[in-house]
Image (tube, helix red, strand yellow):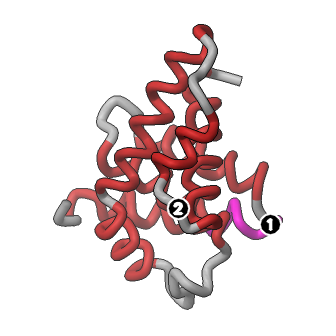
Amino acid sequence: MAARSKARKRAFEVLFEAEQRKVPTADVLTARGRPEAEQLAEEGYALRLVEGVQEHLERIDELIATYALGWTLDRMPAVDRTILRLGLYELLWVDDIPDPVAISEAVALATDFSTEESPRFVNGLLARLQQLKPSLAL
């Protein structure tokens, strides 16, 4: 698995755990301890993702709630909500990741961690937001 894919997985795990336990992401990161030397590069990107999602969470959730037709954030499975937050952050705020890669990686997380229907849902919503990206006020 590529380093950035591992970093996305780690960021997903931290964000999901923090939400489930209702604790700050910093608490989860502290509890997990310092990474080994060979994990520092992926850890740096994972931290960038976690912090970015937290920084833009209000806008991310607003966009998801607006464009996830038939779904409210509260009704959405927590795994899917976390994956969408991560994917949308990469899609809209991480310039060095091509949009198709951000979407593909989010779909891969949904395939690994969520229901059979989730990859299609994640792909559809992120693809829609990619189309709207030029007109979205960030």
Q: Secondary structure at mark 1?
A: loop
Residue 47 left/right relative to 60: right
Q: Which mark is residue 115?
A: 1
Q: From the image, which quarter does the N terminus lie in?
A: top right
Residue type at mark 1: give it. Thr
Residue at image x 29%, y 68%?
59
Residue 55 lies in what quarter of the image? bottom left
Q: What is the crowding at mark 1: few (fewer than 14 residues within 10 Å), some, or many (at least 20)? A: few
In the image, 83 versus 36, the foreground residue is 36
Residues in magenta, as a range: 115-121
Residue 44 quadrant: top left
Residue that mark 2 sits on? 23
Q: Quick one: 43 or 96, which is closer to the camera?
A: 43
Q: Which mark is residue 42?
A: none
Residue 87 at what x, y percent from top left?
49, 52
Going 52% across and 16% down the picture, which residue do you hit?
40
